[in-house]
Amino acid sequence: MKFSGHTNATYGYSTEEAIDLFVSLGFDGMDIGCNDLSGVTIETAVSRRREIAAYAQDKGLVISNLACYAGGEAGFTSLHPAVRRETMRQVQEHIRLAKDLDCKQVRVFPGRDTGEGIAEGERGFQLAVEAYQDLSRFAEEFDVTLLVENHPMTITVTAQQTVDLVKAVDRENVRILYDPSNLIVYAGEQDVESNFHIQKDYIAYVHMKDQLLLKDGRYADTVIGRGVIPWGNILRLLYEAGYEGFLAMEYQRGRQSTERLPDPDIGLKEGLAFLKGLLRTLEG
């Protein structure tokens, strides 16, 4: 297994500074959130994309995934064809961006699960299936895999919903981004082992973050290893399943350090040491 840092941790850093930080801490890759805060978007010039790709390659760092936010407000489940077409266009541009950055994977939102102007239930599901099928053919030309994440406020919140969509799309380059913290916090799915086995045959990427359970029942982000997400059990399941891909540490610090999330050079270092220690125990 290999570890990636995520640009959620490095707001305020240039892309090169983020790469340097991740390399210095011992990460193998970088997961880029494609937004203005990361400095990498579909508006980034091709020449700049190639600079970033070359810099990462020179430092020995793989750009392991692009987190595409297109369709976060409605997307492929919108009742409005113009919205779906624009979402499709934006995702295609992210696939082109991935190619220019020498990145092989793009996280794609399947669409919102409910709300005004949203096709709910079976109709929304079918719209998402058709969109992924079309996108998968487009992505195939660029050697890019599309990742469906079990993510809040989408039609793939739960483990079963996520695997149902991927199985319905039925394309080799559409796979699952497994986020066990999302399953616990947003889907209320506490049985990690059961939910892992539902998805395991389709997992191509993993997001990692940890949560504290506060006295009022809410969850709050913390450094990996300090919270309640059972990472020892999760890594064991991945290891026993033969998973050899990337695990990307989502360190959702925002712009400022907090008591629970210190600066990334502190919190990422601590979390990575914790995870590598767990992995050494499994391998030993």
Image (tube, grey):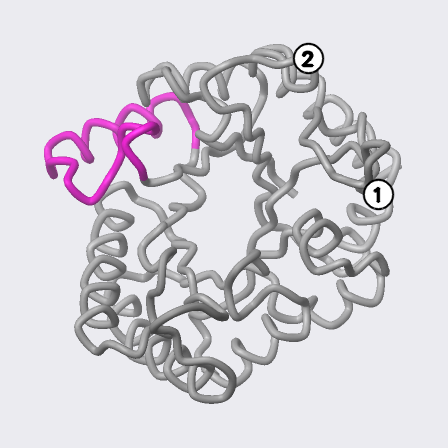
Magenta stretch encompasses residue 112: no
On the image, numbered disc 2 is attached to which residue? Answer: 259
Q: Which residues are magenta?
A: 35-61
On the image, numbered disc 1 is attached to which residue? Answer: 230
Q: Residue at x 62, y 21 (%)?
A: 268
96 to the left or right of 25: left
Disc 2 is placed on an element classified as: loop
Q: Residues within 10 Å of mark 2 (few under 14, many from 20)?
A: few
Percent coordinates x, y for residue 110 in the rendering: 43, 67
152 to the left or right of 44: right
Name the residue nearer the viewer: 176 or 111: 111
Q: Residues within 10 Å of mark 1 (few under 14, many from 20)?
A: some
Disc 1 is placed on an element classified as: loop
Q: Which mark is residue 122?
A: none
Magenta stretch encompasses residue 37: yes
- What amino acid does circle 1 point to? Pro
Percent coordinates x, y for residue 43 in the rendering: 15, 40
Q: CA distance from mark 2 to mark 1?
A: 22 Å
276 to the left or right of 244: right
- What amino acid does circle 2 point to? Glu
Q: Residue at x 62, y 14 (%)?
A: 258
Percent coordinates x, y for residue 217 in the rendering: 81, 41
Quadrant assignment, res 25: top right
Q: Does the rendering let one see residue 245? A: yes
Percent coordinates x, y for residue 15 in the rendering: 32, 23
Number of marks in picture:
2
Q: Is residue 109 above or below residue 261?
A: below
